[in-house]
Amino acid sequence: MNMGKKKAVVIGAGVAGLSAASYLAKEGFAVTVLEKNHQAGGRARQFKADGFTYDMGPSWYWMPDVFEKFYQDFGHTTADFYELLRLDPSYRVISKSGEAVDIPANMLELESLFERFEPGAGLRLRAFLKEAAYKYEVGMEDLVYKPSLSLMEFADLRVLKGLLKMDVLGNMRKHIHSQFSHPFLQELLEFPVLFLGALPQNTPALYSLMNYADMQLGTWYPQGGMHNIIEAFTKIAEEQGVKILVDQEVISIASHNGKISQVHTKHGNFEADVVIGAADYQHLDQVVLKPKDRSYSKKYWDARKMAPSCLLFYVGLNKKFPKLEHHTLFFDTDFDQHSKDIYTTPQWPKEPLFYLSVPSKTDPSVAPENCENLFLLIPIAPGLEGDSEEIRAHYFELMMGRIEKQFGESLIPHVIYNKSYSVSDFKSDYHAFKGNAYGLANTLDQTAILKPSLKSKKLKNLFFAGQLTVPGPGVPPGIISGKVAAYQIVKEFKLGK
Ligand SMILES: Cc1cc2nc3c(=O)[nH]c(=O)nc-3n(C[C@H](O)[C@H](O)[C@H](O)COP(=O)(O)OP(=O)(O)OC[C@H]3O[C@@H](n4cnc5c(N)ncnc54)[C@H](O)[C@@H]3O)c2cc1C
């Protein structure tokens, strides 16, 4: 049935691989996805234990428009797959003074909140977000869809005008501090930068588009859990005729005359006219490809600034705790000191800020009756040494202690399930370079054409997608990355370039 179709192999069934595979199949390729793990989803996998259902990675559903666009490209809509709820409050922040501040979904209420911290800040927020909306529009409609293979791609008038207006060379910290002086508001506006994996002072001011995504587009939750995204993507890929093969780790790639001829797993050899590497880029480049086929050197990779790794806990409690919120950011310690522990002098943080998610507040299906499902996350430096049971236990007690203190209730006696996950797990599960959680940091010198290229420099039929290439980390960028890589192939192969 596939006779005559060009064969595409996609390595990795994360969100970027599933997106790339679906678009290639839609464009007439016979697509096989080879996934190392037993389950598709990559960092957005799920596991079930003792009646609890845990999303292993992403928990913030931002930029619903990007998901909707993906579904519409395949004749679907979000509601075909899951019910999407807007959370209100969007999230809770524990400030340095210990105050619990709920961030409302409603813009007028949010402006009043800003006003309460700093007179005049409400109106300034309105102007700040108007500018951020413009950045979002140009950034998400134009910039992120560029394959970033040449600067000339950015030479059209709308984009050039946009770039000038968007303060691309400024940084987030300066941009925020020039307009807001209360430390709480500054930290609140800097928070989305954590998703981009770099210090606010090293993150281009263009990314205030994330503040628009946060405060105006909102925080959403797909009922049933974030893993519903992966189920939806898998269904779409299969509808398009994609074959997804799990437990198929790619171990080597054979090439001839500057082209890939076969992809090898332990269980078989796969012929390919084109390949998209949507597993961690560094691993494919430095471990799977032969030295002559590598685009970059070890030195190049060692010099990349990686986004943080994480120490995670998936916890089950045998009691309901009405005071807990769906998303809570514990910003009750020094943000800058913790950032230094991640980026400047990597070490285990003394007093980390951390994030607590309790999806069972919104979604009863993720925990047994009268129980809570907790997800705790501390960002830590990539490649950090010294991960051990003792260190994990130390941080578990530290975080649970701060939650208990904050809410005035004891939680630890109610823990009936507890599993941790950190640097070594990211390495063994995903071949993550330095155990990174979110790929490459979005610093100015690692943006667009300065990122590892979507196209191999050595092999004509090898392309890359995922969080280490353009446009960057996060589920929405992953979706876009797959689309951009697929259409680069369509441009170069199907149209016979
Ligand atoms: C803890 C955590 C929290 C996060 N929170 C959010 C959030 O709230 N919101 C958000 O938008 N984003 C979040 N992210 C980021 C987001 O999850 C990722 O950016 C995105 O899922 C990455 O998708 P990907 O397809 O690029 O990579 P991956 O999901 O890692 O997929 C790559 C796949 O390749 C496979 N693979 C690796 N090597 C091989 C091989 N040799 N052969 C075959 N297969 C291989 C891996 O097993 C994996 O399945 C979070 C990430 C983490 C880790």
Image: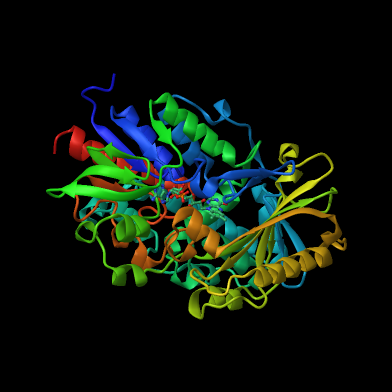
Residue 183 occupies quadrant = bottom right
- The percent position of residue 325, horizontal first and vertical second, equals 75, 52
- The percent position of residue 29, horizontal first and vertical second, equals 28, 30
Residue at (78, 48) in percent of width and height: 372
Can residue 141 be seen here? Answer: no
Q: Is residue 487 left or right of residue 108?
A: left
- The percent position of residue 388, horizontal first and vertical second, equals 62, 70
Q: Nearer the viewer, residue 439 or 429?
A: 429
Residue at (36, 71) in percent of width and height: 302
Residue 173 versus residue 344 in the image, above or below? above
Can residue 378 be seen here? Answer: yes
Q: Nearer the viewer, residue 432 or 84?
A: 432
Residue 26 versus residue 429 in the image, above or below? above
Residue 296 versus residue 316 in the image, above or below? below
**Is the N terminus in the top left, top right, bottom left or bottom right quadrant?**
top left
* Residue projecting furthest to the bottom: 345
Residue 440 occupies quadrant = bottom left
Q: Nearer the viewer, residue 60 or 243?
A: 243
Residue at (72, 36) in percent of width and height: 365
Q: Nearer the viewer, residue 316 or 145?
A: 316
Residue at (29, 40) in percent of width and height: 269
